[in-house]
Image (spheres, rainbow, N blue to C red):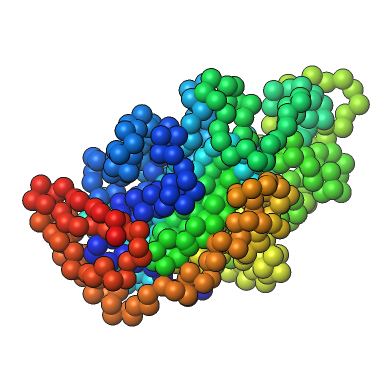
């Protein structure tokens, strides 16, 4: 598995207390006015109630200021929920519904498994993201891909522990990765072609005439402004018994900040880039031997963050992406973009769609034939090891140390990357892959940029101190983990419960469970 450690919650911690901690810390540490929040979405697969959302628990944090006008609820689909929440918030800010306020996305999850080979792949964590204008990482909402289908690789029909088909889940993770990556490459290439043949086409990258960026501005634009012309920031903070992280992201411009919670704190920033840069900036340098539209690939990606059930899977996944690039280089690229004759953009698009459909079918056939080829897998892992160390390893620290934090896993990877690279992410292109069993998967691109102020990558990096925070965690034995899970089994869905654990190991400012009464109503307070 290539894991080193994993995080877990004791009986006074859960996904609600962790979510409350990271949101409150985000508001406090960055002096965010609770009244400035207009949307709050939660990504989880570990809710403690089948009806009442975690989002409604979080509304207690806004009670004092009287802000009850906050849209959004929980997003549930295994580890994908937070990605859906990010998209929802970005879409909201880019829509006519946006009133100029900020949004928060919270990912809070706990991965626990019954005794057996899957138990070491557990983990726990929470991440909160603030979404609004002006940030050092830009999310290009138009350059994303997804793959969703009905499959039972993992589910939670009843009880504390999930039902897992391990081999099928690993297969689904890889197949979804392949499909998302091929679709993302095709979208990037289509946009490049449209920008060459018809710069004014609605699907081509469109520069904003006279657009300027004020890096000193950290506040959203006034209500009533054209949201589609504005940038969006996201700030993320997290906690993972005992680690906590923070980050940000957005549609035209977002921020990611990581601040340490409990015994793990980190600060960082991330955003998204205008389509012109994401799709075309580096493309010209990477055409195939066949003249035509340049092929998009990993040579245009500086860093890569992936959902991490366990580290070894991430290693194999990146190797698989390099194999796709190799296969694509053996096939001709689309020729239509360089035709000298006057062809309507729509005709170019239709021809390119047909070309991409044929390529996809061919690639899927070749990839399916090598899914179980262990010799090829070993060769790909070895051949891609240098690129992995440069592009992927910098974002793997939290995953290796914390374990699988489900919906928070991808945010943990981004936090690790910012902690490792800081200002070196300015101008960098970051590939993000999100996977949730069942299944829902997505891939999108972030672009780093220079941004002055407290959310600059250079300013955030020294505040992350991810490695130091990891070293400060409370160390428990395997026996203590087993005893904690036995207690969790005994009290699962039980009323009239008061935690047995001491608050000594809780960091000041952390929320924790006080008790659950006879009507299953839970009460939380801050230490």
Q: Is residue 13 visible?
A: yes
The number of numbered discs placed on residues in the rendered structure image is 0
Q: Is residue 121 visible?
A: no
Residue pictured at 33% horizontal, 80% vertical = 477
Expressed as whole percent of the image width and height from the top left, the position of residue 78 reads: 39, 50
Q: Nearer the viewer, residue 336 or 255?
A: 255
Q: Of all residues shown, which one is farthest toward the right?
A: 340
Residue pictured at 13% horizontal, 59% vertical = 497
Expressed as whole percent of the image width and height from the top left, the position of residue 359 reads: 69, 42
Q: Is residue 107 left or right of residue 384?
A: left
Q: Nearer the viewer, residue 413 or 427?
A: 427
Expressed as whole percent of the image width and height from the top left, the position of residue 348 reads: 77, 26
Expressed as whole percent of the image width and height from the top left, the position of residue 179 reads: 58, 46
Q: Is residue 482 left or right of residue 220?
A: left
Q: Give the answer, above or below, for where 40 lies relative to 154.
A: above
Quarter of the image holding residue 361? top right
Q: Nearer the viewer, residue 454 or 418?
A: 454
Q: Which quadrant is home to the C terminus?
A: bottom left
Q: Of all residues shown, which one is farthest toward the left?
A: 518
Q: Is residue 371 left or right of residue 353?
A: left
Residue pictured at 54% horizontal, 57% vertical = 267
Q: Give the answer, above or below, for where 82 lies relative to 8.
A: above
Quarter of the image holding residue 475? bottom left
Residue pictured at 74% horizontal, 22% vertical = 201
């Amino acid at each position: 598995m290539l894991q080193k450690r994993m995080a877990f919650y004791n009986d006074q911690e859960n996904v609600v207390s962790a979510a409350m901690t990271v949101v409150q810390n985000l508001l406090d540490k960055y002096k965010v006015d609770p009244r400035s929040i207009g949307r709050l979405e939660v990504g989880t697969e570990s809710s403690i109630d089948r009806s009442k959302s975690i989002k409604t628990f979080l509304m207690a944090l806004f009670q004092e200021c009287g802000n009850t006008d906050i849209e959004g609820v929980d997003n549930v689909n295994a580890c994908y929920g937070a990605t859906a929440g990010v998209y929802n918030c970005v879409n909201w800010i880019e829509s006519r519904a946006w009133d100029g306020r900020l949004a928060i996305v919270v990912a809070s999850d706990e991965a626990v498994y019954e005794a057996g080979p899957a138990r070491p792949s557990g983990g726990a964590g929470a991440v909160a993201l603030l979404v609004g204008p002006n940030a050092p990482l830009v999310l290009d909402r138009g350059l994303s891909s997804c793959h969703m289908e009905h499959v039972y690789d993992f589910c939670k029909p009843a009880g504390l522990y999930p039902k897992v088909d391990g081999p099928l889940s690993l297969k689904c993770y890889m197949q979804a990765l392949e499909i998302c990556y091929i679709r993302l490459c095709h979208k990037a290439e289509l946009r490049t072609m449209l920008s060459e043949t018809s710069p004014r086409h609605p699907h081509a990258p469109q520069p904003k005439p006279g657009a300027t960026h004020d890096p000193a501005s950290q506040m959203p634009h006034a209500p009533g402004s054209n949201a589609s012309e504005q940038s969006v920031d996201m700030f993320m903070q997290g906690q993972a018994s005992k680690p906590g992280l923070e980050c940000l992201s957005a549609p035209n411009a977002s921020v990611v900040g990581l601040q340490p919670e409990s015994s793990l704190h980190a600060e960082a920033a991330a955003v998204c880039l205008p389509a012109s840069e994401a799709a075309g900036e580096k493309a010209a340098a990477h055409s195939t031997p066949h003249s035509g539209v340049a092929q998009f690939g990993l040579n245009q990606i500086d860093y890569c963050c992936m959902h991490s059930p366990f580290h070894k899977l991430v290693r194999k996944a990146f190797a698989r992406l390099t194999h796709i690039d190799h296969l694509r280089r053996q096939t001709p690229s689309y020729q239509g973009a360089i035709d000298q004759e006057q062809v309507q953009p729509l005709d170019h698009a239709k021809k390119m769609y047909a070309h991409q459909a044929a390529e996809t079918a061919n690639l899927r056939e070749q990839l399916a034939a090598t899914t179980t080829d262990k010799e090829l897998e070993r060769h790909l892992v070895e051949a891609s090891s240098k690129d992995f160390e440069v592009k992927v390893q910098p974002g793997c620290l939290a995953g290796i140390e914390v374990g699988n934090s489900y919906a928070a896993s991808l945010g943990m990877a981004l936090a690790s990357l910012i902690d490792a690279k800081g200002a070196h992410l300015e101008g960098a292109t970051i590939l993000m892959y999100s996977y949730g069993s069942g299944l829902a998967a997505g891939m999108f691109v972030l672009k780093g940029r220079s941004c002055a102020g407290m959310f600059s990558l250079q300013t955030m990096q020294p505040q992350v101190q991810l490695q130091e925070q990891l070293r400060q965690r409370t160390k428990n034995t395997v026996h203590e983990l087993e005893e904690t899970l036995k207690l969790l089994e005994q009290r699962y869905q039980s009323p009239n419960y008061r935690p047995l654990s001491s608050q000594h190991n809780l960091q000041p400012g952390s929320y924790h469970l006080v008790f659950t009464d006879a009507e299953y109503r839970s009460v939380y307070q801050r230490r």
